[in-house]
Image (cartoon, rainbow, N blue to C red):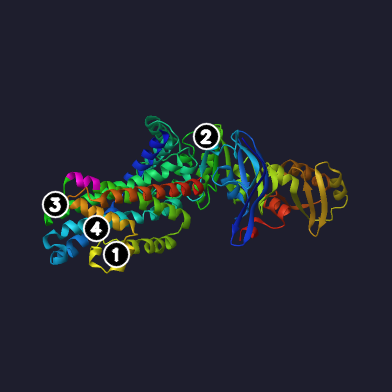
């Protein structure tokens, strides 16, 4: 009960801060928007992607990319807060340590979902077509991926405690994950060895699942498998990060 | 309010271990302003952060606000306030919002938090800028807000880490007034400082810390008395003659020595001794050309206990 109350307290304050300085939410959606508006039309001309249905394939990938990159760098804000002393101030109060993490992750997930909704909304005029139930399931998966990456990012931020170390570290994790997930182009276009490696990338499963959902096929086995995979990973990342919070933000 | 014994902390940096605090014994009474004076790196902040539950001591024991620090840090947190050295506010919220939020973090109801925020704005004189964002505040305004945040839940004990470092003289005087007000309201204040004048003027008792150990602990007046006593220097227009031996017999004179231009006396209490010395000089009929009283500062105490001045130690 106190955990829920404290989490809500941390969450609402974080939301206020985002609303007062929404520049990062806008910057965060700028890149996927560029892909949607400037790269998407190229795909329309590629017969391998089914021509007119290109957005059905491309938008789900963009959403997964947004979920990964939009939440991967939230650790920077935590380092800034550590430096400003606000974390330390809260440490000498009875507030739950777990709530300090969960409230922030909640803010990250909510802003990710808002960004995703904007992206989907803008893709509709280009011919994107998705059922509300399928979209809800896809958003649930996005939320889990957001939780996974934001808690991971906070955990890493608490370990390295410096922006200079955080950026290259996070980039070296995300770039291979991104390229091996078939986000920009389906991996079916690639050679066998690339597909073999990608099988081990959980986000390649997530991309396939999102595409199945946008194709109106929630029964595709990729969907439940991807949901199980990201749920387990999100749980692991949260527990690890919560432990980091508990030891370094004692 | 605080009782520690053998409090220790070392930090490892690479292969070397630095003993930041090595066995600190303290006894801070209820309702006093207790000052922790020492140069940068002496272990002041480390000790304060240990007592405020932010870092775990390597050894020793401590009772803080009546609670065992090692066994029940969470309970200690409820009872104390803590104001860090470097500030503690977000840029894009106002003092009023921060104060109310801090009340909520201390489990006060929303209405009570708002009420306390309004009270704190009044008593810490934040009214003028209470609804502006913190990024617009001056250093002194920020510091007052930091302290107000630290005591919003009315703790019995508040820790202030270098509350006046970097403030201009006017803001510093303002902060002293706030600290005294907290004490007058019944709070115990534990503060660190590397300003001698601050320890002297503000604190009821002072502990001097150097290289992680306490080298002196008492009221500022008593520390100074133990170290040196007050010095009265007399410039005389003629040979003192029997005046010297007469003063030597006086009960208030501890030491006497002849200088090239007169006499130098070490006395117990300068302001009280001065008129008596004057009468004595007058009665002896020796012409007096100058008289000067020098009272020792905490810097003399620091020098006597550590072999160097605080300014040397800080640089």
**Magenta stretch: includes residue B214:** no
Quadrant for residue A186, please give it: bottom left
- Residue on which the image places disc 3: A129
**Which of the pair B207/A149 is nearer the observer?**
A149
Label 1 Cα crowd, 10 Å radius (few <14 / some 14-19 / many 20+): some
Magenta stretch, residue numbers:
A132-137
In three-dimensional space, the C-alpha distance between marks 2 and 3, rounded to whole angstroms, equals: 59 Å
Viewer-nearest of discs 1 and 4: 1
Label 4 Cα crowd, 10 Å radius (few <14 / some 14-19 / many 20+): many
Q: Quadrant of the C terminus of chain B?
A: bottom right
Q: Earlier in the sequence, mark 3 or mark 1?
A: 3
Residues at marks 3 and 4, common chain? yes
Residue drawn at the location 36% of the way across and 51% of the way down: A148
- Residue on which the image places disc 4: A61
Q: Quadrant of the N terminus of chain B?
A: top right
Chain containing the residue with disc 4: A
Residue A181: x and y in percent read 29, 61
Residues at marks 2 and 4, common chain? no
Residue B71: x and y in percent read 59, 38
Chain containing the residue with disc 3: A
Viewer-nearest of discs 2 and 4: 4
**Which of the pair A70/B246 is nearer the observer?**
A70
Q: Secondary structure at mark 1?
A: helix
Instruction: Say if residue B87 shows up in the picture.
Output: no
The numbered mark at residue A195 is 1
Residues at marks 1 and 2, common chain? no
């Amino acid at each position: 009960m106190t955990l829920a109350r404290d989490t809500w307290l941390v969450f609402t304050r974080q939301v206020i801060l985002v609303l007062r300085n929404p520049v990062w939410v806008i910057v965060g959606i700028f890149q996927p928007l560029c892909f949607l508006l400037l790269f998407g039309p190229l795909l329309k001309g590629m017969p391998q992607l089914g021509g007119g249905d290109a957005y059905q394939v491309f938008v789900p990938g963009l959403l997964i990319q947004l979920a990964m990159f939009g939440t991967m760098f939230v650790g920077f804000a935590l380092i800034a807060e550590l430096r400003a002393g606000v974390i330390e101030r809260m440490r000498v109060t009875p507030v739950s340590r777990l709530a300090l993490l969960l409230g922030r992750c909640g803010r990250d997930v909510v802003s990710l979902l808002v960004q995703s909704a904007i992206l989907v909304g803008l893709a509709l005029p280009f011919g994107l077509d998705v059922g509300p139930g399928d979209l809800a399931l896809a958003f649930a998966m996005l939320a889990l991926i957001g939780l996974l990456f934001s808690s991971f990012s906070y955990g890493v931020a608490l370990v390295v405690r410096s922006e200079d170390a955080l950026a290259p570290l996070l980039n070296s994790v995300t770039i291979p994950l991104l390229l091996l997930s078939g986000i920009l182009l389906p991996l079916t276009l690639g050679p066998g060895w690339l597909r073999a490696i990608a099988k081990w990338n959980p986000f390649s499963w997530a991309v396939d699942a999102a595409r199945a959902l946008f194709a109106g096929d929630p029964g595709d086995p990729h969907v439940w498998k991807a949901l199980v995979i990201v749920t387990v990973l999100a749980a692991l990342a949260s527990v690890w990060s919560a432990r980091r919070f508990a030891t370094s933000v004692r | 309010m605080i009782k520690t014994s053998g409090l220790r902390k070392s930090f490892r940096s690479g292969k070397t271990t630095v003993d930041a605090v090595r066995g600190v014994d303290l006894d801070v009474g209820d309702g006093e302003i207790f000052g922790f004076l020492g140069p940068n790196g002496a272990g002041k902040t480390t000790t304060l952060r240990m007592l405020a539950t932010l870092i775990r001591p390597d050894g020793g024991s401590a009772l803080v606000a009546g609670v065992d620090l090692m066994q029940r840090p969470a309970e200690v947190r409820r009872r104390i306030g803590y104001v860090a050295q470097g500030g503690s506010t977000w840029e894009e919220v106002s003092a009023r919002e921060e104060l109310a939020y801090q009340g909520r973090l201390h489990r006060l109801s929303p209405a009570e938090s708002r009420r306390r925020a309004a009270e704190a704005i009044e008593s810490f004189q934040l009214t003028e800028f209470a609804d502006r964002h913190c990024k617009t505040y001056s250093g002194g305004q920020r510091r007052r807000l930091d302290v107000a945040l630290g005591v919003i839940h009315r703790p019995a004990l508040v820790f202030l880490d270098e509350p006046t470092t970097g403030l201009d003289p006017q803001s510093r005087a303002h902060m002293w007034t706030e600290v005294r007000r907290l004490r007058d309201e019944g709070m115990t204040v534990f503060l660190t400082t590397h300003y001698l004048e601050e320890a002297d003027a503000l604190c009821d008792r002072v502990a001097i810390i150097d290289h992680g150990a306490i080298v002196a602990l008492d009221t500022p007046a008593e520390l100074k008395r133990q170290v040196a006593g007050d010095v009265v220097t007399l410039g005389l227009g003629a040979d003192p003659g029997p005046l010297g031996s007469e003063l030597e017999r006086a009960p208030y004179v501890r030491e006497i020595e002849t200088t090239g231009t007169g006499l130098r006396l070490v006395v117990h209490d300068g302001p009280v001794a001065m008129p008596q010395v004057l009468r004595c000089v007058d009665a002896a009929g020796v012409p007096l050309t100058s008289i000067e009283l020098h009272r020792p500062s905490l810097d003399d105490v620091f020098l006597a206990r550590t072999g160097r001045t605080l300014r040397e130690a800080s640089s």
